[in-house]
Image: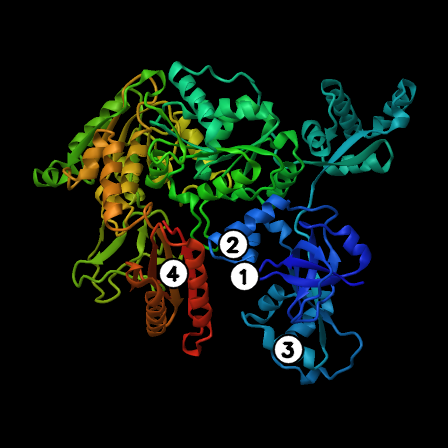
Amino acid sequence: MSYFINVILPIPLDKEFTYSINKTEAAFLQPGMRVAVQFGKSKVYAALVTKVHQNPPLVYEAKEIEHILDESPIVTQHQLELWSWISNYYMCTKGEVMRAALPGAFLLESETIILKNEKSLFDESLLKDDEFLIYEALQYQSLLRIQEVMNIVGKKNVLPVIKRLIEKEVITVQEEIYEQYKPKIVRYIRLNTTYTKEEALRDLLDTMTRAPKQREVLMHLFTLQAQATKPIKVNELVKTSNSSAAVIRALVDKNILDEYHLQTDRVQYTGETTGNTKQLNEYQHKAYEEIKDSFENKDVCLFHGVTSSGKTEVYVKLIEQAIQKEEQVLYLLPEIALTTQLITRLQEYFGEKLTVYHSKYSVNERVEAWNNVKAKKSKAQVVIGARSAIFLPFANLGLIIVDEEHENTFKQYDPAPRYHARDTAIVLAKMFYAKVVLGSATPALETYYNARQKKYGFVQLTRRYGDVLMPDISLVDIKTKYRKKEMTGHFSDTLLTGIHNALKEGEQVILFQNRRGYSPVVECNTCGHSPQCPNCDVSLTFHSFRNQLRCHYCGYHIAMPQKCMACDSVDLTTKGFGTEQIEKELQELFPDHNIGRMDQDTTRGKHGYEKIISRFEEGDIDIMVGTQMLSKGLDFRNVSLVGIMNADNLLNFPDFRAHERSFQLMQQVAGRAGRTKKRGKVLIQTYNPFHQILQQVSVNDYTGMFTDQIEERHQYKYPPFYKIIKITGKHKDYNRVNEATNWLAKSFRNVFNENVLGPEFPPISRIRNQYHKNIVIKIPQGQSLNKTKEVIKKINTSFKSIKEFSGVRVIINVDNY
């Protein structure tokens, strides 16, 4: 009797593959375990078992597996169901979903290692220079990895050299699989049991008069033991006794001390748990009860609460309720910056029950979080994280909270799977019969529309916590200000007065500019030339901090030129402005105050966000300049003024969501002001103060904005009335992309008629030396989504078989907004 398994491989291939196993392996293996398998000629992957069965594959001979990697499944049945939903709905392969879902440590891949061939004899003089270098290196070390060979030979493509050496039988090549996850082992120390009795100990100390350092270490060990009951770490003892590891090693060698190791978690909570959640005020309590009522007959509830109305406190009560039922809770946030602030708040209530999971954590920390969630440990009852936390192996999920659900950072754009965490969360909740709360002060139009159509429950909280008034929003017309010469740099006199007053009162200020760097364009005053990125269709942004020009799309950078590259003139100016320039102007205008900046350049590294946010919270920074990271749900108690430097570059954007997005962004930024007793002030600088959206922002009119926008969406056939699938062709040859996308658009038009837009080049059509061209397919409400996708897949398959278009990558993005 033969046995087989189906596996998913972590590579972008559509189908599952079958491998053969023996009877004992068949009895042991379960879906969700990993096995090492060979795929292709020599590459070894960690594949995930989805099914154990007895049907041999029809088209190919099933290979045997290399070995089994897990003792129990690391992926649950629910996860496998979710993966297949994502791959069907978002039109990507299961391998791509597997790559995105599993922490990197689980995705073992093999690495080629090069060894000296001991068996063969050859003439060294026949070797070429580069071959001899490798041969010589192997005399000194037993094996080489590909990266090391690249360094030795000094070039990227080393495969031809390796191939020649294999042919000459100088070397042999092997594939080595390496485990990436290592549990954290900590060294502890204790006194050997022979010295626990008092006489033995006295004798020992008497004999140690000639080794004062060792005696000192022992004295410190006794003090530490007396103070705490927990085991004593080696490095702790070294630190307190001011000695070295060598002294402790000598004591261990003499059998006076015993050394032992324990496995510990990398992420541990060390603070105090107060355990008491805040009392809700009457409006919050009413909202909490309404959410519970809406869960009686609806699984999803939209919680529309204005900024600073205390939505988090309501969530905390809902989480408490789920914990009492011993259910797991997933709390999704759009930004890692937000998790840092919220974790401290939630840890006060839930202490150790909280686990954090996002991409700034190391591979090993993520594996530990994964295992804790799967094992239903109490320390992972509440999981808080960015969009990737949706993939964790929940066992009994009871509640999902999607905070700031309108944020576009919940959508993954590259690489595949291009999923939307909010929509995926709703599907995940269905599998567990769990409930979902979508919270936002400015909900996405589609969500609000669904709530209006009674598809979701709907609860409103219209009052700010502590009855603080909504911020007072004023529009500043900078066109007139420039004409009247009332501008200082990029600041209008109104904004400067506002900043002066706030600082005088000892309050803090936030300034928002959605562009990082110093200025987006450097231009020559003589000939008008501005340096462009050689790989993308954008001008290089000037970063004064590093004195270089950078491309924000591909990372290309050069030193800031001293003269024009085209005409050698030294008369260069910068146009436009980013966060760096605002920061520099502020330093000149307010030399006595601390200015902070929060954008992608200043928040690199695992704790980048925490440092800046905690400095601002502690009042160490008076004025914070930032990009949209600042707008997302952060809670600063002492901010009384928010300034938006230029609202127009948000509004004038070629996207059907531009107006909705700018409304949300400005409302969210405005919501950072005046969150305690005093009413906050918001100043929006614009060239066009009569713009409909700006008028609606200034009076907090979400419903007005919704009515206008939904009318336009209906008229021009956009979501929520039509679904959208965007198809992008990519290639480094302009003409080939043109021809390929024209062929695709024609084929789609034959089926979908007028519901196909394009092909059209986007505003930035070349990125990383690849030309992009887009086709948009709109799907009306009556049309079957599955059949539409089948047609798209069929056309895509025919496309791939056309020789002229080989090399053109087609990217399918479902719900690309």
Q: Amino acid at mark 4?
A: Ile
Q: Is residue 627 visible?
A: no
Classed neighbour count for the residue bearing mark 1: other residues with Cα under 10 Å, few (<14), some (14–19), many (≥20): some
Seen as rendered, the residue at the extreme left is 484
In the picture, residue 592 is in which quadrant?
Answer: top left
Residue picked out by circle 1: 12
Marks 1, 4: nearer the viewer:
4
Classed neighbour count for the residue bearing mark 2: other residues with Cα under 10 Å, few (<14), some (14–19), many (≥20): many
Residue 788, image x and y in percent?
41, 58
Q: Which mark is residue 163?
A: 3
Q: Amino acid at mark 1?
A: Pro
Residue picked out by circle 2: 87
Separation of marks 3 and 1 at Cα, in angstroms: 27 Å
Name the residue at 53% across, 58% down.
93
107 sits to left or right of 100 = right
Separation of marks 4 and 2 at Cα, in angstroms: 16 Å
Q: Nearer the viewer, residue 409 or 622?
A: 409
Describe the element under mark 4 as helix, strand or loop.
strand
Separation of marks 1 and 4 at Cα, in angstroms: 17 Å
Describe the element under mark 3 as helix, strand or loop.
helix
Is the C-beta separation of discs 1 and 4 under 8 Å? no
